[in-house]
Amino acid sequence: MSVEIKTDSFSTILVDRRDNGLVIVTLNRPEEGNAVNTDMGIELLDLWTDLVRNNDGLRCVILTGAGEEAFCAGGDMKQRKGMSEYAWRQQHEIFEQALWTMMECPVPVIAAVNAKAFGGGLEMILAADFAYGVDNVKLWFPEVMIGILPGVGGTTTLPRIVGEHRANEIILAGGAFGSAEALEWGIFNRVCSIKELMPAAIATAVTIAGNAPLAVRQAKKAIHEGLQMDVRTALRYEVECYNRLTGTEDRAEGTLAWNEKRKPVFKGR
């Protein structure tokens, strides 16, 4: 079943919908380093909102950038030059809502980091469920150098991944780091050559799409929400997520297929 996305008139992002439930989203302002301007922020918010609301048949999303120069250079500083405080805050609220809605996507989101990612671009990577990156990437939070902070999730997501001390060094000193550090610190799950990046991300997405869709969604929810809880509450929440699967057709089909030594046919029911 193909995924229906209501808004097809995007000018700053490309949306490739596959029949296997995979959606590839490409930030498409390569001439500006795929920097996020107001239009892109609005379009990303529209896209993620639609994927949250109309997700029948959706199995996995890959987020990447156009070209080989940048995944995303963060907020468009050319547009922000001379922007009033009110306009800046209004734009930032759009960016906030877009990223928060991305994090609410019910299926896994894989960041395929094709090149450098600064500021808000790095925040998108941290907000994804996991990330693959090219072997020569540069990652950077330069916000404190221009009088702000990583305010679209960076100060929240980064320490949860790399730890508080490492996050303090990255954000407060404003130093860039590369693929090897991102892999070592858990920001990247895998480092690839540029030629290997999208095939690797797509192969993983296809594997996810072939698993029981309701189970994938409940597992993602249990992991994400459980991390916000104490251990005992998280264990109870995990059981609630588990119990929602025991009465499904997919659970019965998976058990039967396992015993019959065949590939299961999941229907998301």
Image: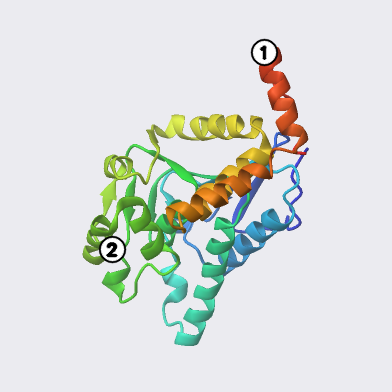
Graded by Cα atoms within 10 Å as few (under 14), some (14 to 19) or many (20 or more), the crowding at tag 2 reads many
Tell me if 147 is positioned left or right of 251 in this view.
left
Q: How is the image coloured?
A: rainbow
User: Residue visible at 39% across and 63% down?
Assistant: 156
Quarter that holds the C terminus? top right
Q: How far from the left and from the top, in percent, is residue 76?
A: 45, 67
The residue labelled by disc 1 is 261
Of helix, strand and loop, which one carries label 1?
A: loop
Tally of numbered tags:
2
Q: Amino acid at mark 1?
A: Lys
Which x, y percent locates residue 193? 39, 32
Tell me if mark 1 has few (under 14), some (14-19) or many (20+) residues whose alpha carbon lies within 10 angstroms of its own.
few
Residue drawn at the location 67% of the way across and 38% of the way down: 213
Q: Is residue 178 visible?
A: yes
Q: Residue at x 52, y 69 (%)?
A: 96
Give the residue type at disc 2.
Ile
Q: Which residue is mark 2?
A: 171
